[in-house]
């Protein structure tokens, strides 16, 4: 896992909806080992909340998300995580009628999270990070032998719908009138390399 620290940190900095402007800072790194996706987020934000449980309304908490569609699939997975590692995963072609992944399957995800509230005085708020190990078995609607050379589309997000100051950040730009992460047309291209990096 130490190798995650040397990977490029990608910012999640698009603010598609100016009405929800925020000074929240987010970056992520992603890799794979063939059998699992390794995903790390680092966040600095003013407010922190973790009230939800697995397959609950995780987006209302301090939340990071990863949406992914493999190959040319018209459906996608939404993986949502709060700062304590509670998780929601669904699958489908649109926001409505998502097929939720079982709690038993969710329990296979490994994670480590750290929260630091001791920021400098001029930076009131919280810094937290979460490292996720997402095994290929999580993607129950696909038979993935290895992530190596796999083609996908996806987007990475940070939100907090239920925070005192809600915010919605994305990695790839979203064109929509109202906050909505369930927009496959806004997914960017993802290519999992043959080695350990993705």
Image: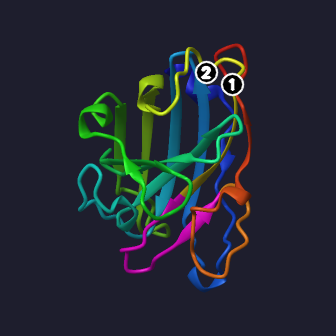
Answer with left or right where residue 63 lies relative to residue 21.
Answer: left
Q: Which mark is residue 42?
A: none
Residue 74 in the image, given as x and y percentages of width and height:
64, 47
For the magenta stretch, what is the residue range? 158-170
**Label 1: element kind:** loop
Q: Nearer the viewer, residue 181 or 94?
A: 94
Q: What crowding class fits label 2: few (fewer than 14 Cα within 10 Å), some (14-19), or many (20 or more)?
A: many
The rendered magenta stretch, by its main secondary structure, is classed as loop
At 51% from the left and 38% from the top, the residue drawn is 40
Q: Which mark is residue 150?
A: 1
Kindly indicate whether the residue at mark 2 contacts the one at mark 1 (C-beta within 8 angstroms).
Answer: yes
At 72% from the left and 59% from the top, the residue drawn is 186
Q: Quadrant of the C terminus?
A: top right
Q: What crowding class fits label 1: few (fewer than 14 Cα within 10 Å), some (14-19), or many (20 or more)?
A: some
166 in magenta: yes
Answer with left or right where residue 72 lies relative to residue 30.
Answer: right
At 58% from the left and 47% from the top, the residue drawn is 75
Answer with left or right where residue 71 lies relative to residue 31.
Answer: right
Residue 103 in the image, given as x and y percentages of width and height:
25, 40
Residue on which disc 2 sits: 147
Residue 51 in the image, given as x and y percentages of width and height:
23, 62
């Amino acid at each position: 896992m130490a190798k995650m620290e040397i990977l490029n940190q990608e910012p999640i900095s698009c603010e598609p909806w100016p009405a929800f402007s925020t000074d929240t800072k987010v970056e992520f790194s992603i890799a794979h080992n063939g059998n699992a996706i390794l995903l790390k987020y680092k966040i600095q934000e003013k407010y922190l909340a973790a009230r939800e449980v697995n397959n609950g309304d995780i987006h209302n908490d301090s939340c990071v998300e990863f949406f992914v569609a493999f190959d040319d699939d018209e459906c996608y997975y939404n993986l949502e995580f709060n700062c304590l590692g509670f998780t929601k995963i669904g699958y489908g072609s649109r926001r409505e009628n998502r097929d939720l992944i079982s709690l038993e399957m969710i329990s296979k995800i490994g994670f480590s999270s750290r929260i630091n509230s001791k920021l400098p005085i001029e930076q009131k708020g919280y810094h937290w990070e979460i490292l996720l190990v997402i095994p290929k078995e999580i993607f129950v609607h696909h038979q993935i032998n290895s992530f190596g050379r796999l083609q996908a589309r996806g987007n990475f997000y940070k939100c907090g719908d239920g925070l005192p100051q809600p915010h919605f950040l994305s990695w790839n730009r979203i064109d929509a009138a109202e906050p909505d992460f369930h927009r496959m047309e806004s997914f960017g291209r993802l290519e999992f390399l043959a080695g350990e990096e993705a």
